[in-house]
Every structure is written in C-alpha cells, then in structure tokens.
Amino acid sequence: MKLLSVNVGRARAVPYTDHPEGVTGIDKRPVAGPVRVTAPGPKGTGGSGLAGDTICSLRHHGGDDQAVYAMAREDLDAWQEELGRELADGAFGENLTTLGVEVSGALIGERWRVGPELLLEVTSGRVPCRTFQGHVGEERWVRRFTERAAPGAYLRVIEPGEVRAGDAVEIVHRPDHGVTVALEFRAKTTRRDLLPELGPARAALHPESVGLMDKYLAKYAS
C-alpha cells in the first residue's frame, strides 16, 4: 500500500461554483517534493491540512475533520473505464491518491501511518457537490457518484508530518466495529434509515454525521 501522488490546488476562477468570488481549489495537481500536513483548525476557519493547498469554500470544506481527502486509484480507474477518458491522479480533487488501500471500505476511526511521520484517522466519506460536478464535466454526476457509494475518505491529522509520492501507507489501527466509509456515506445520503448503525463509530465520526444520527434517533425514538 502506498501513495501514488500528493495533490494540491490553487484558487482559480470557474463558472460552476457557488463561491461568491467564483473561485475554487478543487483542481488538484500532483507535486514532486515533500508536503507538510498538519491539523488546519476548526471548520469554517481552517482550510486544507496540506501546505500549499487552497480551499476556497471554508463553510463546506476543510477543517480538522476534513483535513485530508484520499481517493483510491482503483476507484479512479473504474470511473475512467466507465467514462471512457483518462482521469489523472488528483482528478476528483483528492489530496492523496493511493494504491492498494481500501479507502471507501476503510473503517471510521481507522488510522493510517503515511510515510515515517504522518498519522491520519478516517472520519467520513465525501459528499459530491455542484462544484465537483462542474469540475468533472459529466451530466448527472452528483447522482452517479452518490449511487456508486465509493466516495473516498476524509481524514483528520493525529500526528503531523511530511509526505511525498511513493510513501508507504500502513494501517496501524482498525476499530472493532464494522462502520465503513461506504456505510457512513449511504447513511447520510440515500439511506437515512442506516444512521443508527453509525453509533459504534461515534467517537471518531465526523461531527456533522454525529449530528445527523442524533437528529434521526431523536425523531424516531420510541
């Protein structure tokens, strides 16, 4: 298991974002040198965990619980075959493109050692948005991406460090529950009835998913 690429993006103007200044940092490109990864701060004020990476919409993206976004090369390859065109590393706006890692099948709270220093913890799956659809340039993209339920994973930084392409990825902790990124994603998108099943992962779950689960339980509690 390893990193194929580390990807960062700069703000650029596009016609498909709701950002008031019309800019987005979703266009991530691989970088050659080492990149420092740290906890960026709370959502709303903290952006990306990667030095040199830009997040424009702090209301919806970034922050400690979404510091890093990872996507499996295997999932990009599957979409590449379906779409009939090449998808470069970083094409989905991911910071880390991995090889051999079950990213969407990872457990919430699973911890990855990436390179010799960085320690990350899986928090949630990525929900597609209008900007993502515009960036990919495919009709009905939000629905298609949602239906596949292989969203890649957001991670928080437990121990900061530098990473670069080629670094090993080692799973150093796996929780004893069965709450995967894919399950969490389905529960907050197409299958709200699955929200109660997220309970065993509460301690590591993204706070927004905890909020959805608690609202559901409060509404349907007998």
Image (tube, helix red, strand yellow):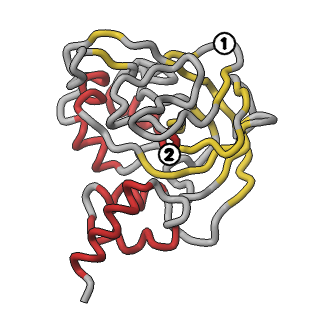
Name the front one of labels 1 and 2.
2
Is disc 1 in contact with disc 2, using a CB cutoff of under 8 Å?
no
* Residue to which mark 1 is pinned: 32
- Element at badge 2? helix
Q: Is 133 situated left or right of 73 in this image?
A: left
Q: Residue furthest bottom?
A: 222
* Depicted 209 relative to depicted 54: above or below: below
User: Closest to the observer: 48 or 94?
Assistant: 48
Which residue of the protein is positioned furthest toward the right in this rendering?
116
Q: Report the quarter where the C terminus lies.
A: bottom left
Q: Which of these two is toward me, 154 or 182?
A: 154
Q: Is residue 83 left or right of residue 36?
A: left
Where does the image place residue 172, in percent across and percent down from the top left?
74, 53
Q: In the image, is 166 to the left or to the right of 214?
A: right
- Of residue 161 and residue 116, the one placed in the foreground of this image is 161
For label 2, the crowd category at 10 Å Cα-Cα, with few meaning under 14, some 14 to 19 and many 20 or more, is many
x, y (%) of residue 48?
50, 29
Residue marked by disc 2: 65
Residue 24 placement: quadrant? top left
Residue 180: image x %, image y %?
Answer: 50, 60
Residue depicted at 55% across the width and 44% down the height: 155
Q: Secondary structure at mark 1?
A: loop
Rate crowding at label 1 as few (under 14), some (14 to 19) or many (20 or more) other CA atoms within 10 Å: few
Q: Position of residue 165 (x, y in %)?
A: 68, 23
